[in-house]
Image (cartoon, rainbow, N blue to C red):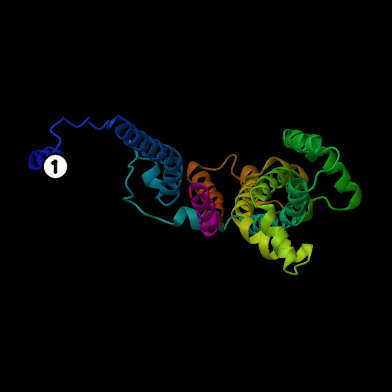
Amino acid sequence: MSHATTNKTTAPDSRPQPEVDRRPLARRRRNRVLLQVGCIVITLFMALPLYLIALSATSSRAALQTFPLSFIPNNFSLETMQTFLQSTGILPGLINSVQVGIFTLLLSLIIGVPAGYAVARFAFPGRDPYQLFLLFTRALPIVVLSVPLAQLFLQTGLYDSALAVVLLHTALALPTTILITSSVFLGVPRDVEEAARIFGCSPVQAFLKVVMPMAIPGIAAASIFTFVMSWNEVLGASILTLNQRTLPAQVLSSLAESPLAYRFAGGFLLVIPALIFIFFMRRYLTNMWGSTIR
């Protein structure tokens, strides 16, 4: 009797096991594939114009006159780029653009990062209307700011100088810099900063040694936006300068009636510095995306 009971208890269960529902896993894989395909399509959509501009700028003039144009580089030539760089005002405009972009970046960070920290950490009367006001100032057309500033700079002697363009670009970039950095500082735990102060750091030391390293990816994103905005801005620079123009303003004024090859060369030269700056800042953005995913 006991032997039969033992066999009964040790006998394997012959009932059929329920099938595993693999539909959620398949749906997740499909969504990931669609996401990757969408990223590839967007990348190609953004990279194709850059490739065409680079191809046209590094091709000979005879190759640009052929039809249909080849999408594969088969007639490489730097003659157009060399002639364009030797044109009047191009190299000074390039130097002015680099100076304006760097000083705009530094001034925007010096003012915008502490302002973003104050908005994120301190509750003061009118904080929400202040952030809304920042958005309203960013919505103003550039002409609304540049024309009164041109009159002011004429009276103060700053007209037709790189400083005038720096001040205008800083005014345009500050709202976005403050809003981006404030949202980044909100993501930094307050407990970490308070722990640093408990261990002997002053408020400034806690900000520089603890908060700033954790907010570097967001500050890098604001820096990229500021530099690219300053580099590409053309209308305000054209209004505020005559002889000390930035490269976009110089290209706009000098290439309006130029041959097509020189226009491609000017566009290619405008793209290169911004891409170089983004290339060196990309690792900070990668760190930010990685921390977000984790």
| Front-lying residue, 190 or 261 | 190
In magenta segment, residue 119? no
Looking at the image, which residue is at 68% across and 55% down?
Answer: 191
Image quadrant where residue 149 sits = top right
Q: Which residue is mark 1?
A: 10
The amino acid sitting under disc 1 is Thr
Percent position (x, y) of residue 210? 67, 62
Residue at 55 percent across and 43 percent down: it is 258
Residue 57 visible, this orientation:
yes
Look at the image and tell me whether residue 99 can be seen.
no
Give 11 or 178, whichever is nearer the viewer: 11
For the stretch drawn in magenta, the main secondary structure is helix
Question: Magenta segment: does it hold 281?
Answer: yes
Query: What count of labels does the image hold?
Result: 1
**Residue 1, position as x, y percentages in the image:** 8, 38
Residue sitting farthest toward the bottom: 200
Task: Find residue 279 and report its horizontal and vertical position in percent.
Answer: 51, 56
Q: Secondary structure at mark 1?
A: helix
- Please tell me whether residue 152 is drawn above or below residue 68 in the rendered image: below
Which span is picked out in magenta?
Answer: 278-293
Furthest toward the front, the residue is 1
- Answer with the quarter of the image where residue 27 lies: top left
Q: Nearer the viewer, residue 78 or 279?
A: 279
Label 1 crowd (10 A; few <14 / some 14-19 / many >=20): few
